[in-house]
Image: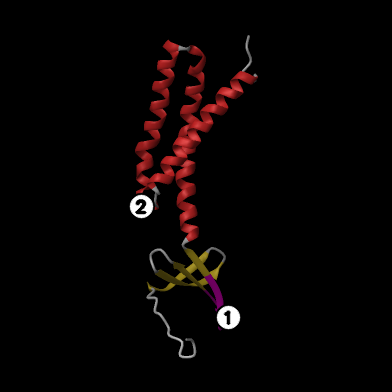
Amino acid sequence: METIFNKKNFKTIFIIIVIDIVIIGGWTWYIKPEDSISIILAFVIPLIFLANLVIGSITYFIKKYYTPFFMINAFVSSFMLYYFFVWYIEMEAKKFYNEWEFVINNEKYDISYITKDTVYFVYINCGKGCSNGYDRGIVKEKMIRCIFCR
């Protein structure tokens, strides 16, 4: 009986995972997902899952050796797609997000500024995990001329 932990199986799994990373990572990078289009995951993840099951079924008739790898890959690639999608959204949000904290009259204020949307939010921090909205608006950047600079 052949074990699953042999060199040939690891090589096959490694190749399939590298192909998944390149295709799914490239697709995620290409579409540049935002949190507003996260609903697409409800359609794409089952599609990826079914595509791997179809490929696994086809390989059953061509070469049975690859069938279990595509059946396992159906789960791995679906999880990988979800992870890359969420990871890209989080990285983009962190890139454009600024936050400051300060205290006035024993009240702690938090200011959040999203540079991509030019929107700011001011919250009064009332304890751990608690905040009250105080103000929000749009930031208008202005050029300030320096009379001493030439």
**Which amino acid lies under the numbered mark 1 shown in the image of this protein?**
Asn
Quadrant in which residue 136 is drawn:
bottom left
Query: Circle 1 — which element?
Result: loop
- Label 1: few (<14), some or many (≥20) within 10 Å? few
Residue 50 percent across, percent down from the top left: 38, 27
Asked whether residue 103 is drawn in magenta, I would say: yes
Q: Which residue is mark 2?
A: 36
Q: In this picture, which residue range is highlighted in magenta?
A: 100-109
Outermost residue, top direction? 1
Circle 2 residues within 10 Å: few <14, some 14–19, many ≥20: few
Residue 74 tag number: none
Q: Does 146 sit above or below residue 3?
A: below
What label sits on residue 106 in the rendered view?
A: 1
Q: Position of residue 38 (x, y in %)?
A: 38, 47
Dominant secondary-structure state across the stretch colored magenta: strand
Q: Secondary structure at mark 2?
A: helix
- The residue sitting at the front extreme is 150
User: Residue 79: where, in percent of width, then height?
Assistant: 48, 36
Whichever of labels 2 and 1 marks the residue nearer the N terminus, that label is: 2
In the image as oriented, which residue stretches furthest toward the bottom?
147
Say which of 3 and 109 sits in front: 3
Which color mode does the image show? secondary structure
Residue 36 position within the rendered picture, expressed as x and y whole percent measured from the top left? 36, 52
Residue shown at the point (34%, 37%) measured from the top left: 43
Q: Is residue 36 above or below residue 99?
A: above
Q: Which amino acid type is marked by label 2?
A: Ser
Q: Which residue sits at x=45%, y=37%? A: 24
